[in-house]
Image (cartoon, coloured by chain):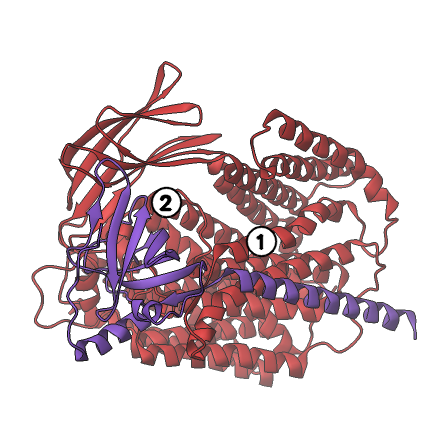
Amino acid sequence: MNPTRKRRLGFVLLALAAIIIAGTLMTLALRHNVRYLLTPTEVAAGKNADDQLFRLGGVVCEGSVRRTTGTLDVRFVVTDRVHQVPVRYTGILPDLFREGQSIIATGHMVGDGFRADEVLAKHDETYMPKEVAEAIARGKTLPHTPCAPPTP
Amino acid sequence: MLPELGQLALILALLLASLQALLPLFGAQRGIEAWMRIARPAAYGQLLFVAVAFGILMHAFVVHDFSVAYVARNSNSLLPIGYCIAAVWGAHEGSLLLWILILALWTGAVARFSRSLPLPVIARVLGTMGLVSVGFLLFTLLTSNPFARLLPMPSEGADLNPLLQDPGLIMHPPILYSGYVGTTVAFAFAIAALLDGKVDARWVRWSRPWTNVAWALLTIGIALGSWWAYYELGWGGWWFWDPVENASFMPWLACTALLHSQAVTEKRGSFRGWTLLLAIAAFSLSLLGTFLVRSGVITSVHSFAADPARGLFILVFLGIVIGGSLLLYAWRAPRDNDGAPFAFASRETLILANNLLLTTACAMVLIGTLFPLFADAMHLGRYSVGPPYFGSMFYLLMAPLVLLLPFGPLTRWQREQASLPIKLLLPWLVVSLIGGAVAFVAMPNAPWKYAAGVAIGLWLVLGTLRFVRRRLAMDGQRFTAEMLGMTFAHIGIAVFFFSVLLTEATSVQKDVAVARGQQVAAGDYMFRFDGVQRATGPNYLSDRGTVSVFRGDNKIATLHPEKRQYAAGGQIMTETAIDPQINRDLYVALGEPIDARGGWALRVYVKPWVRCIWLGALLMALGGFTTAFDRRFRRKNETV
């Protein structure tokens, strides 16, 4: 092998090694940081693994928001008009958070309730995760479940 | 009447753009001089008509002509005049028109400032830019006409999204777009070189100043976007790894790699094929960024429409641009031996490492951004990729970049004794590490990032200054504008890393429920909530809070965060209040009223050094501009 070819081979091997390392790291990083988006119906079907962080998407039930006076604790119910999940959150809610508005909360299940670490209401007021919209559309064909206030 | 004229102007611009694309490109292939000479006047003509169309749309906004659907959707008669103008690019159709206007401006500038270039080159460059323009004009006219009428005419408009009613927004899109569109120039030069068949150092020399200016504008545009998000969204963060931010960051990474690779190709003749590919990649990523943000693929504040016709057009357009240029590359790329040979210890190798790291970072952002879309399209479920993915990948990739950066300028082209730059820099590396250690001991409670920020900042600044000193000590060697630009940019990187790491390490955030008169301690500061009053703005009602900030016994600031309710759409908006200083920001945002007695949720931040993040970006941009004005780029064309 002449020197030029040898050096090229060196570069190619280096690049290959770099790609393999990068690929492995990326897969690892992705595996730990990918979050599912689940609807209340999927939660009711037990699709979430225990203690695992996931994102809950749905509509804030009308009349379900309860605050504890003097603190930032807030409870509300998220629904896809078929099933409901009670949510607890401590913190400041986004500007677009309101009853009847679709939100995405990140957190995990504690017992039968969802403990949210972060609540996002999308900037676009008409935005709704596609699966939530689909679930709501399906829900319209079923007998309507009214929003119940959260149990204390 | 006027809006119809605007549309007519766009159609004329499309005709001129087709002329500017086809005749010069064919003329250059066939050697027909008269056809090649069409390029310049056609470019100026296109600029004129696009500017007329843009002016007419702006006029429609200023006079509140709600018979134009786009105006009716994005403005309101109460909207202040400044925001009326900014509303022109506040949504999809108008921002496309802005893109086209900026492309026409860049094309005009290339036509004007490239008089010394050979005719076939300029014909091909302007022709390629004309093709891009044809694509965008067709897209606008066929799927996103900003002049479409709305009948019957509504008496009032729907208002501009309140998030966008902000001075930051007036400047952010035009500057960011100037950067995006600027990559077209490097792309056009690359395509021209491929068509010409002479892929040599000359095309790179001609395109380098343009690339530098585009990169600098892109840097400022991203920094403005980040600054806007910081004070407008009210979360106190400056970067969220949101798909929309990623869309602007990917072309930046590719363009940064391109800058460095172009320097090698111009000076040493190496990396020719790679530079061409990077030019194509930077432009393709700019296109992807524009469309990703504006097409509604990703739903966020930036996307405004989900229209299948648009999506299809975009995919076809992207396919033609990326596929076409890669085919051309495969067909015409240089096959001969690639420039001057270089040893392992050489500046070429270091720049190669820089390019590998930057393109890997770019690929990693691309995968993280597109993976959720891909998974959704393949019905693998709906995912999101969290910021920790991007964060951890960046630490890994930027660490070697930071370590190697000062070595680059101190290492000679082609061959260097590895011991020399190490000898020059070792003392400064030691000084930086000592600085980091001192910081670690001085702030025992701060996380490792604090010490790392100090050490990295010192290392990059001292290492860069070592190069400056060495260069100035050489007799008879000029310190060129290019070197000065590099120095600015590298010190900008130092300032950036320093402030990012220190902000992350030492920021204090408190979300609290406060009653009137209640105090909140954060860091060295005491925030006292003095209640909320009602106030009215031109097109909103507001709850205006008063927060007094004390340090010790001294009152150092009175802040007025607001919660606004906009009249037209009823949207609620948080307006943060910030007391800025170079080494710290005091940041307050109102949450919501939590009881009937005037208690509010309040968000309080102390963010050290956060301002320097954008200062660092501005220094980088200054470096890009400085480099663009190097004398070497203004020499008359000569054979290399």
In the image, residue B553 above or below residue B94: above
Q: Quadrant of the C terminus of chain B?
A: bottom right
Q: Nearer the viewer, residue A96 or B106?
A: A96
> Marks 2 and 1: same chain?
yes
The answer to which image quadrant residue B549 occupies is top left
Residue B629 location in percent, x, y?
59, 49
Q: Check disc 2 and report the residue beneath it.
A: B235
CB under 8 Å between callouts 2 and 1? Answer: no
Residue A151 location in percent, x, y?
21, 53
Q: Quadrant of the N terminus of chain B?
A: bottom left
What whole-number distance in Å separates the C-alpha atoms at marks 2 and 1? Answer: 21 Å
Q: Check disc 1 and report the residue beneath it.
A: B392
Q: Amino acid at mark 2?
A: Trp
* Image point (24%, 54%), residue name: A76
> For mark 2, does the 10 Å Cα neighbourhood hold few (<14), some (14 to 19), or many (20 or more) residues?
many
Secondary structure of the residue carrying numbered label 1: helix
Residue B539 location in percent, x, y?
15, 46
